[in-house]
């Protein structure tokens, strides 16, 4: 059977019989269209400034375990001194957070996230057991 066969059921519904290959091809095309629509929506969010694209080099640095604070700071083009000043922190405290010597208080991390235009979760996405301290 190379062509779809159409017939009317006893209840008056028009039914179509497809081969498995025809059905699989149809499902694949639908999934492709759904993927294309998801890409279009994402591109529209990027164009509207609702999402941003992060180059692979920055993502790789975080995957490799580098401090998300340091990576995002670099991505935003800030020096440690500039970020510390804008976040209301001492440069020494920011350095301790970036090097992992201190977790950083929730208030400090929230200030950093605000300056970097991030959600607080973006600074902790790869941590297993540790979370921000209540300092």
Image (tube, rainbow, N blue to C red):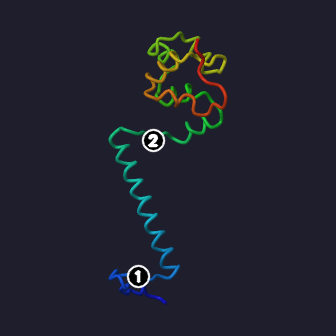
Q: Give the labeled residue for mark 1.
A: 16
The tally of labels here is 2
10 Å neighbourhood of mark 2: few (<14), some, or many (≥20)? few
83 is higher (above) or lower (below) than 26 = above
Q: Give the labeled residue for mark 2.
A: 53
Residue 100 percent across, percent down from the top left: 65, 21
**Residue 45, quarter of the rendered image:** top left
Q: Residue at x 37, y 50 (%)?
A: 41
Which secondary structure lies at badge 1?
Answer: strand
In front: label 2 or label 1: 1
110 is higher (above) or lower (below) than 118 = above
Q: Residue furthest front?
A: 11
Which secondary structure lies at badge 2?
Answer: loop
Residue 84 percent across, percent down from the top left: 50, 15
Q: Residue furthest bottom?
A: 1
Separation of marks 2 and 1 at Cα, in angstroms? 44 Å
Residue 79 percent across, percent down from the top left: 50, 20
Viewer-proximal residue among 46 and 77: 46
**Residue 65, quarter of the rendered image:** top right
Residue 105 percent across, percent down from the top left: 56, 15
- Quarter occupied by the C terminus: top right
Q: Residue at x 65, y 25 (%)?
A: 130
Q: Residue at x 35, y 82 (%)?
A: 11
């Amino acid at each position: 059977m190379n062509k779809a066969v159409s017939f009317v059921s006893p209840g008056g519904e028009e039914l179509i019989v497809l081969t498995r290959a025809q059905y699989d091809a149809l499902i694949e095309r639908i999934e492709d269209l759904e993927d294309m629509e998801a890409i279009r929506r994402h591109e529209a969010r990027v164009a509207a400034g609702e999402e941003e694209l992060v180059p692979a080099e920055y993502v790789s640095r975080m995957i490799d375990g580098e401090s998300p604070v340091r990576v995002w700071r670099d991505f935003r083009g800030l020096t440690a001194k500039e970020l510390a000043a804008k976040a209301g922190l001492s440069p020494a405290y920011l350095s301790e957070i970036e090097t992992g010597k201190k977790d950083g208080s929730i208030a400090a991390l929230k200030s950093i996230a605000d300056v970097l235009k991030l959600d607080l979760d973006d600074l902790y996405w790869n941590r297993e057991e540790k979370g921000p301290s209540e300092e």
